[in-house]
Amino acid sequence: MPWRGEIAFADEALAFRGESAENRFHAHAAVQCVYAKTGVRIRDAGGRVFEGPGWLIRSGVAHSLDPSPKLTLILIEPQSRLAMGLLRQVDAPPITVLPEEFGVLVDPFPSLADGLAAFKQHYAGAQPAVDRRVLAALEHLGAVTARDAAAVAAAHAGLSTSRLRALCTHQLGVPFAKLVLWRKVRRACASMNAGHGLAQAAADAGFADQAHLTRTMSEVIGLTPGVAARVGDFFKTDLHPKQEDGAGSKRRRFR
């Protein structure tokens, strides 16, 4: 069964709904929500299996998903108001049960973009309690392509690299280096969206070469660029959307 369905983007989140296939063990820099009305099965790196309709996976937690005929998946930037608001509603374990209303909020909408907008409106919390210097460093990552992105972002925020790493791990639960890789993978996707090949996309995102991009993308999202591209139009989407129709999200179907 291939990956096939609908994808929607917001400024701080990415959502997918449809058929999911096998993926490798990976750990997102994002907070992840996974939901299927008929149940979904998740495996962690220690061999434990989690079965049920909805799960939240905290940033930095290694896992894999079993294939599902209809899955809704949302990835959220961990420093965002949306992530902070959602995390206040769940228990502490690294993989924990989603609030019961998740399916009611997202699943009934014919448009995934509308479901994502409803999800954002319900869970967006107060301004995240994250050190402003960490937020400044993350913001600066959008302008950094060098291999020493963490050092450049730390200097921009007025921090040493080691202090930025410590703050990020403590406040977001994921090393800053993991967030750097997450942003670099997104940048590579944007390059491929513009019609560039893997080698050029790797260079645009600051990877050493095409092989480095392939390894990193596999580790970060559980799919290689080749597998993701075969989904269909995955890379033909706007990864940095502007506000549209008041929802701040865009959607794209891929077959």
Image (cartoon, rainbow, N blue to C red):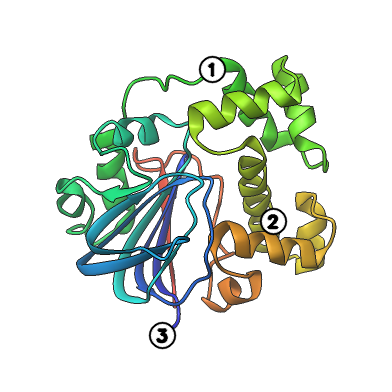
Q: Tell me, for residue 188, which label it has, or none.
A: 2
> Which quarter shows the N terminus?
bottom left
Residue located 53% across and 54% down the image = 27
How many C-alpha atoms fall within 10 Å of the one at disc 1: few (<14), some, or many (≥20)?
few
Who is closer to the viewer here, 217 or 219? 219
Residue behind mark 3? 1
Q: CA distance from mark 2 to mark 3?
A: 26 Å
Q: Earlier in the sequence, mark 3 or mark 1?
A: 3
Name the residue type under label 1. Asp
Question: Which residue type does callout 2 highlight?
Answer: Ala
Q: In terms of secondary structure, where does tag 2 sit?
A: helix
Quote the CA–CA distance across marks 1 and 2.
28 Å
Q: Earlier in the sequence, mark 2 or mark 3?
A: 3
Q: Secondary structure at mark 1?
A: loop
Can residue 114 be seen from the camera position used here?
Answer: no
Left/right of residue 237 with respect to residue 140 in the rendered view: left
Marks 3 and 1 sit apart, C-alpha to C-alpha, by: 43 Å
Q: Which sits in the foreground, 226 or 34?
A: 34
Could you tell me the amino acid type at mark 3? Met
